[in-house]
Amino acid sequence: MKKPKIVILGAGYGGLMTTVRLQKMVGMNEVDIVLVNKNEYHYETTWLHEASAGTLHHDRVRYNIADVIDRNKVDFVQDEAIEIKTDEKKVILANSEIEYDYLVVSLGAEPETFGIKGLKEYAFSITNVNSARQIREHIEYQFATYSNEAEKNEDRLTIVVGGAGFTGIEFVGELTNRIPELCREYDIDNDKVKIFCVEAAPMVLPGFDPELVNYAVAQLERKGVEFKIGTPIKECTPEGILVAKDENEVEEIKANTVVWAAGVRGNSIIEKSGFEAMRGRVKVEKDLRAPGFEDVFIIGDCALIINEEINRPYPPTAQIAIQQGEVCAHNLVALVRNKAELTLFKPDIKGTVCSLGEDDAIGVALGKKMVGTKAAFMKKMIDNRALYMIGGASLVMKKGKFKVL
Ligand code: FAD
Ligand code: NAD
């Protein structure tokens, strides 16, 4: 009898968690499992702000997929998914195509630019290892050029971060550690460097605990970050950004580096493949399948699930993607074994910790607020836990964060 074929698209938190759980649960000849990913490595999306600032080398944020999958049970295909043809039960890849009986879509997020002029052309975004490497290199090049040019262009030393959500704040936190290093390396006076964090909403980290937010703002301001709150970015140009000053007036902030960290959307393959979606995110059923599909699961940043207590979508996080991966693996096994009952997904939010650089953070974990080194330690534990969940103790030993604070 033909074995059912499960195809998993994307080896991020959701896809890799599904794969490693699945490989433990199924017998050797029970199913064919195929994992498709653009790169031969997985990267910790949640650490990319560090690689982007240059406080952590990009090789520290990635590991080979081959190190965590069981080659006897999982075929790995390094390729790029282009489109899903649900009516033909196949996926078009850049170099081939692949048929499936069951499909898991876990292709992560893309930056949401809301159609703002110039962002795609002139702003960077913290999206993957290559974009992180490019941001780090670009900033360093600006410093190197500034120190070597006869007529000094001060804009080289100005960095604008668009958005004071979690990504924006974590990135500026890393910059406060990195900039003094760069200044020492290139003999530049630290006071010449400007870091602007520009936020459209009336507060930093909208919706987060105000006491913790106040702590974060004070700490980052003390280290030289200038916040521009209630200031939507209207345009990005080769010279910097234009922000709305008031209803009729715009103001220019000149900067040679603009990093857009003001929101994400689901992978554009979702819409291209005809799934009904809101900003690339499909409102999935409780068993994580796409509405109207018996054979397609959508998880992680491509999925939208509603927090029924407040009737609003949960923010897309690694925490949720990992938990969805576990449930998705269970449900795939249930379908393959013809079990009628599928597990329903319910997020178990253990807390949120936002780093403010190497040794500082704010957070709420298991209902308790924390700041400073205690919160920074907690953040490292969370990072290590994600490694442990996917690759066990050996992966934590290889890639974990152990620096004593
Ligand atoms: P990802 O983990 O991003 O993985 C997607 C995978 O798909 C990648 O391997 C990618 O290479 C692959 N892929 C993409 N397109 C294709 C294609 N066309 N073909 C083949 N492969 C493809 N969440 C938290 O819970 N805690 C945090 O502290 C936190 N910090 C964050 C910090 C930053 C800087 C950022 C950007 C996000 C952070 N998040 C955090 C959010 C979290 O990273 C995401 O919610 C999570 O990564 C989503 O998991 P995923 O499996 O959907 O996608
Ligand atoms: P976000 O949507 O959480 O924040 C984006 C911010 O940009 C918002 O504050 C928004 O008001 C602002 N913004 C939007 N348009 C703007 C404009 N034109 N000008 C200026 N500001 C503008 O996005 P994110 O920070 O990229 O986070 C993405 C997801 O990843 C979220 O779900 C987040 O919870 C998660 N994440 C979590 C952590 C953590 O837990 N430590 C860290 C990073 C990201």
Image: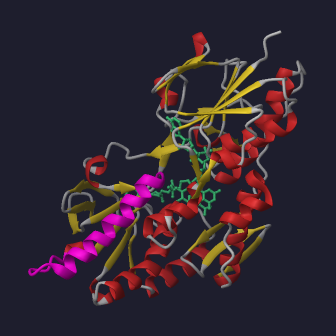
Residue 175 lies within the magenta run:
no
Identity of the residue drawn at 79% across and 28% down:
332
- Single out the residue that lies furthest toward the front: 72
Q: Residue at x 68, y 84 (%)?
A: 404
Query: What segment is highlighted magenta in the picture?
Result: 127-154
**Image location (x, y in percent) of residue 125:** 40, 55
Compare residues 167 and 133 and report the one nearer the observer.
133
Q: Position of residue 252 (x, y in %)?
A: 20, 65
Q: Quadrant of the N terminus?
A: top right
Q: Residue at x 21, y 74 (%)?
A: 145
Residue 288 visible in the snapshot? yes
Residue 237 location (% of width, % of height):
21, 56
Q: Quadrant of residue 2?
A: top right
Q: Is residue 325 above or below residue 241?
A: above
* Residue 402 sits above or below residue 120 on the image: below
Magenta residue check for 129: yes
In the image, residue 111 sits, relative to residue 89, either above or below, namely: below
Q: Quadrant of residue 337?
A: top right
Prevailing secondary structure class for the magenta stretch in the rendered image: helix
Image quadrant where one finds the C terminus: bottom right
